[in-house]
Image (cartoon, rainbow, N blue to C red):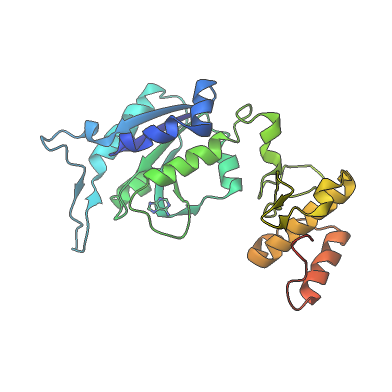
């Protein structure tokens, strides 16, 4: 997977390239991240990339010319290949696990980072093939969003995560064709490690029991309970067993905290 990031702040990305998953993915050859300074595609002395908006209003808007030049130079490297060009913006479609999955099938992605006032609409209409938002909030620029997209997508590239870290158990992951399992499409269940008691707070007994059947059931129930309380909208999309539905009914019937923390 190759990411071509077009930005006025290439240095912004240094730290994420030097730590964690993206660094590992690059070292193992699963990901290549190329940073392109948008100002290199300007031709005036001040390397200008933005201008005042027509019609007035606050802020500056990225002009189309440098962005078109930058992307066209990247396209020219492999003119035969389809090249998805993603504009990061709060107006884009929402990044979800399903969208990350879809993007992870591409061999190469161009990510355009703009400042929050935006880019000339002709970039969105005639240059970008996709527009993605990482959430219903406004950032000062697309750099953080591009970093989020790269991390979410790269960890889905086969071979990037070891077996132990397998993303199939993640919150929101619904691997096609697998039977209803522990956490599919739900928020993740709680996790604990040593010590078994910390400042008087004990790890739920069942997790120490070694009874895998009970542990699986506990995890499923905790994931269902957390999802029901925090993100009930997700439940509508999750295949539920009869046992799941009975558990949710119990939660609904309870007046206060229906499940103790030890659950
Ligand atoms: N740029 C500014 N805000 C953004 C957001 N929420 N998602 C993606 N890009 C952005």
From this viewpoint, which residue is outermost toward the bottom? 255
Where is residue 137, by image quadrant?
bottom left
As displayed, is residue 246 above or below residue 222?
Answer: below
> In front: 52, or 201?
201
The total of numbered circles placed on residues is 0
Left or right of 155 on screen, residue 108: left
Left or right of 124 on screen, residue 245: right
> In front: 200, or 156?
200
> In front: 93, or 8?
8
Please tell me which residue is depicted at 79% across the width and 58% down the height of the picture.
221
Residue 173 rendering spot, x and y as whole percentages: 67, 46
Residue 67 in view here:
yes
As displayed, is residue 37 above or below residue 149?
Answer: above
As displayed, is residue 230 above or below residue 149?
Answer: below
Where is residue 238, by image quadrant?
bottom right
Please tell me which residue is depicted at 78% across the width and 60% down the height of the picture.
262
Please tell me which residue is depicted at 29% across the width and 38% down the height of the picture.
9
Left or right of 74 on screen, residue 245: right
From this viewpoint, which residue is outermost toward the left? 45
Residue 125 rendering spot, x and y as whole percentages: 37, 48
**Quadrant assignment for the C terminus:** bottom right
Residue 129 in view here:
no
Please tell me which residue is depicted at 58% across the width and 35% down the height of the picture.
155
As displayed, is residue 253 above or below residue 56?
Answer: below
């Amino acid at each position: 997977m190759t990411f071509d990031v077009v930005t006025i702040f290439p240095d912004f990305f240094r730290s994420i390239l030097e730590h964690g998953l993206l660094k590992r993915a690059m070292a193992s050859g699963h990901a290549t991240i190329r940073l392109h300074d948008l100002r290199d595609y300007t031709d005036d002395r001040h390397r200008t990339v933005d201008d005042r908006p027509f019609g007035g209003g606050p802020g500056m808007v990225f002009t189309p010319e440098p962005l078109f030049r930058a992307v066209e130079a990247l396209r020219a490297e492999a003119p035969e290949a389809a090249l998805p060009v993603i504009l990061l913006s709060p107006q884009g479609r929402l990044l979800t696990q399903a969208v990350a999955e879809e993007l992870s099938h591409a061999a190469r992605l161009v990510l355009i980072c703009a400042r929050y006032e935006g880019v000339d609409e002709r970039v969105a209409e005639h240059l970008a093939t996709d527009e993605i938002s990482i959430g219903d909030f406004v950032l000062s620029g697309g750099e953080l969003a591009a970093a989020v997209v790269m991390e979410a997508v790269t960890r889905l590239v086969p071979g990037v995560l070891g077996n132990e870290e397998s993303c199939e158990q993640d919150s929101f992951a619904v691997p096609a064709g697998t039977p209803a399992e522990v956490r599919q499409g739900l928020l993740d269940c709680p996790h604990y490690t040593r010590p078994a008691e910390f400042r008087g707070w004990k790890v739920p007994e069942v997790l120490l029991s070694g009874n895998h059947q009970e542990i699986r059931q506990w995890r499923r129930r905790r994931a269902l309970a957390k999802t029901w309380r925090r993100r009930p909208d997700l439940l509508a999309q999750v295949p539920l067993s009869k046992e799941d539905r009975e558990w949710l009914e119990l939660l609904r019937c309870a007046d206060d905290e229906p499940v103790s923390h030890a659950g």
